[in-house]
Amino acid sequence: MKKMLLFVIFLTFAANAQTLWLEENFNYGGTSNPDITVVAPSWVRHSGTQGPQYNANGLTYAGFPGSGIGGAISFTNGSSGVNDGDVHRKFSDSVTTNQNIYVFALVRLDSARATADYFLHLGPYTIGTTFRLRVFARAFGSGWAIGLSKSTETRVEDSVNVLNFNQTYLLALKYSFNTAATNDDQVTLYVYSSGVPLAEPGSPIVTLGPVGAGTTGDPTNIGAIAIRQGTNTPSGRIDGIRVGNTWGIIPVELTSFNASVNGNIVRLNWSTATELNNSGFDIERKTSNGEWKKIGFVKGAGTTTTIQNYSFTDKDLNSGKYSYRLKQIDFDGKFEYSKSVEVDVNAAYNFELAQNYPNPFNPTTSISFSIPQTGYVKLSVYNLLGQEIKTLINRNMEAGNYSIDFDAEGLFSGVYIYRLESNGMTLTRKMTYLK
């Protein structure tokens, strides 16, 4: 019996309207290392004797694209000359024109000192000693308070919200870079304990600038992010750093794209973890020596942080090799192509019963099968007690490939068995219904 062929690729669409200067998930393996610059050469220690270290335990935050990927970077307080130091990583390009710089990061503190000190900041592309968008922490009540300074001026602190130790927060920072005057830049800070805002709320907990006492003038460029530890810094971890020119922290993230071949039918399945302004997907196909052609369109989910499953079936194909790709289209017309996947179609029919898709499902799923010769066909669904609960097909059918939808509305959640019978042959598979 010829088995159904399955081709899978994993990829991520870029956020079309967003320039992403830096994305750091600290995916450097499963062993902690006291020197982040050894594990990840893109980080450079620019001061002190010992900077923050690589920690194999990353941070998680529901709905954030960088959640649960790889490790994190740890920082701690300590003695001067022992573990004081700063590390930084450059952006992919230096920012020198009027625009907003958005920084997103997951932060989890273990402890903080009574004296506030900063542990995260921006700097110029060639790092110096005048830093920007400095993020502070100090012990506050039973937890800690967060503060912000534009540069070297006195910080502005959120004295209302007590942040908890050992809890992961999403920091959203904004540096408004302007070149019109020497002291017109502005910085803002947002902090979230749950959820991922899909657009900038406009109500930060701290705003600073454009003019602030003690500032040394605005920089000519911003091009690096830095993490530091010293005698008064807090102790904790940072993970999931993203730096870009828009609030769009949720791209269309395609987590899987696969093509299954069943006789002369190709079924495409793909899933997204998140979507931002996604109008939908053009389905494109080409033969070995042909050009890409649009063969269909599947509507997207717009903007969402919920996993979405999609499928498309291409039927009645001649034998040969075919390539497929997705063209993800935003509502404003911008688009991005996926990588392609190639399949080899053989029109010869075999007796096959495919795994239902999606699986698990709620409340409908699709069951595909093929029969090699004309004859009586029965396709039924049973519970685990062996009781037949629904007959989907019970008739004579010609040889070929088929697909039928099953609606489990009214049934209990659980595992069910579906069975295909034809010309004395039987195939069964399991499927899971989750309400």
Image (cartoon, rainbow, N blue to C red):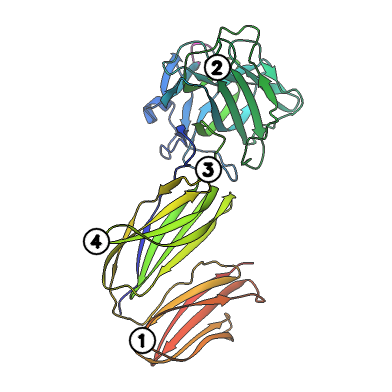
The amino acid beneath tag 3 is Pro
Q: For the N terminus, which image quadrant?
A: bottom left
Q: Residue at x 34, y 55 (%)?
A: 340
Going from N to C along the chain, the mark reached first, 4 or 3, is 3
Give the residue at mark 3.
65
Mark identifier at residue 201 = none
Residue 200 among magenta residues: no
The amino acid beneath tag 4 is Ser
Q: How far apart are marks 1 and 4 (CA)?
A: 28 Å
Going from N to C along the chain, the mark reached first, 1 or 4, is 4
Q: Which residue is drawn at 45% across and 80% down?
A: 428
Q: Which residue lies furthest to the front in this view?
A: 333
Along the horizontal axis of the image, is 184 left or right of 145?
left
The amino acid beneath tag 1 is Ala
Give the residue at mark 4.
288
Give the residue at mark 1.
399
